[in-house]
Image (spheres, coloured by chain):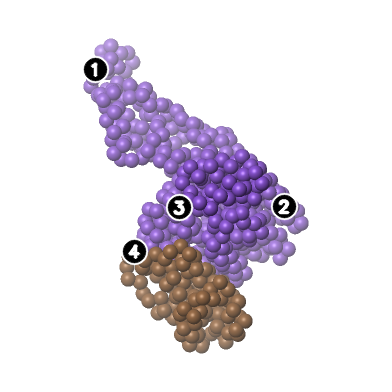
Chain colours: A purple, B brown
Amino acid sequence: MLGKRLRFETMHATEFVDITDRLRAEVRQAGMRMGRLHLQSLHTTLGLAVNENEPLLLRDFEGLLNRLAPANAGYEHDDFARRFDIAVDEPINGHAHCRQLLLTGFATLLVEDGELVLGRWQSVFAVELDGPRHRELALQLDGQFSLPLQGGGSGRGAVKSDLVELELSRQLLVDPEPVSTPMRRLVEAGGKRLRPKLVQLAAGIGPRSEPLRAAALAAAVELLHNATLIHDDYVDESTHRRGRPTVAAAEGPERAIAVGDYYFAKATRLIAEIGNRDVTSTIAEALEAICASQIDDVALRGTYPGDHDSYLQVVRGKTAALFAAACASGALLSEASPEIVEALRRYGDLVGVAFQMADDLVDFSPSSGKPVGLDIRQRVLSLPLIYAAEDRTVGPEVRRLLAGALGDDEVGRVAELVTSSDALQRVRREAQALVDAAVHELETVELDGLRPTLISLAHSAVDRIS
Amino acid sequence: MSVQLIDRELDRLESLWEDGLSEMYRTYLEAVGSHEPASQPKLALAAALVEIGVQLQGLGGRAAAPPTLLMGDLCLARSSRLLADVASQSVQVAFAQAIEQMSAAAASCADAPAARELLLDALKAS
């Protein structure tokens, strides 16, 4: 369990301070995977609330508080003549105490898969009722942490994730505003940073370990990944990613294409500037595989029941290629032996496929914090849908529904059928077997003490399904 | 570039060859004379793929439909891999900067410099 204080200044008598991003950052920084975040106001005139951050609605809330507990309504608390031990600067604030009674002084938020579980429109507010003041919230994080992966550790397996975050910030700082603002929004919204972690870990294996070069490569790989996501979101017509509107939804497809292209180019430039030809080729080949598989992915949509081999071929390009390249390029940067580079490449490939399978399962998990049924709506050939479509009991109905118009009812019914079959269980078992195979790859080479961290990372890639 | 090599490098992009890519390729081939003879075809193809790629995507204009965008993405990715195969670091960097310049202009709704001009300059980088 970790505990700390969240401090901030308020500017107005009544103010809704949105602390969602700060809480997300705390979870990320702590490397928390699963558990609860407890929040407690340390003041009697500061409340907490979870609601929508819409300016007019916040004015409604303020109006409601004013009506229920108006200022200067003759509060006994404000009758100093009848009170003892009054501070010299005691404010007249009976109304603020009464308003706090209408809110709450503490809150518990769930954390899953390293992210706060919040609905699309939910934000967390500290509600100032007697400002402006200096305020403090107590915060406790209770749950499972991927400790070896968080920044600031000093052991052999510690990844200096702070260096990557700094490098990302530094790179975004120098970019033109029309491209950097949407990318910053995406980067700051979180994400698991698995690929940069793999780069950094692998870059510590060989004889030439240079943390700054590794962080530069890791940040470039993360930018490249995000650039592909920006285009994918347009292709998939996704409205939200990491709880925020996608670039295409917020700023239109033209801007999304430009931002994706800019960071595709910038990332390849940063990688070229590192000056290691093998690293450049490794990432370039992965990028080519991603783009080719993305075409296949779209072309195969709706072709149920599909088949396992086509699925694997798409996923190995679309997702696993960058995982494998992250591992291999990090190892190449550190001048690790060819045996180690290839073992890590195979490890990354297996972890990447397992990660995609876990991602497929999230589409059927209402507790994931992500919208359920997106793959169904887009008729993606995901593994749970392939298995359900070929199932003797539910298969005919699943195929019939997926072949027709898909409204909310149909999507819900498909999800119900998939869940009632053993499709999810099969995918879960398969993903776990891939993680085991990835761990097995690590046994064939000497990894200078990094094996436990790589094993932990492999498990964290699928921990959403455990 | 031998026919087999072209075939391999145009995998999935064959339809573009008759659709303007061959012409672009020939234009850039005339501009790569100062590079190693063995690397000239791949460099010229890399430049042609960037030019046709951003065109397909609709960069700086109306956004392409998703399948066309993905073809454009593949063109850029293929170009990047070709450069990784044969280009010097300075040419790789110059190509990336050319795309950065075009996409930053597109994001700002500003007039972008012509792709061909930028790419011809990139091929001269040393």
* Distance from the alpha carbon under mark 1 to that under mark 2: 72 Å
- Name the residue type under label 3: Ser
Q: Is residue A316 above or below residue A428?
A: below
- Residue closer to the observer: A449 or A49: A49
- Residue closer to the observer: B7 or A262: B7
- Name the residue type under label 4: Ser
Q: Which mark is residue A208?
A: none
Q: Identify the element where label 3 is drawn.
A: loop
Residue A119, horizontal then vertical, whole percent: 45, 39
Are the numbered discs 1 and 2 placed on the same chain, yes or no? yes
Mark 3, residue position: A238
- Residue closer to the observer: A184 or A261: A261
* Distance from the alpha carbon under mark 4 to that under mark 1: 57 Å
Q: Which chain is disc 4 placed on?
A: B
- Name the residue type under label 2: Ala
Q: Which mark is residue A74?
A: 1
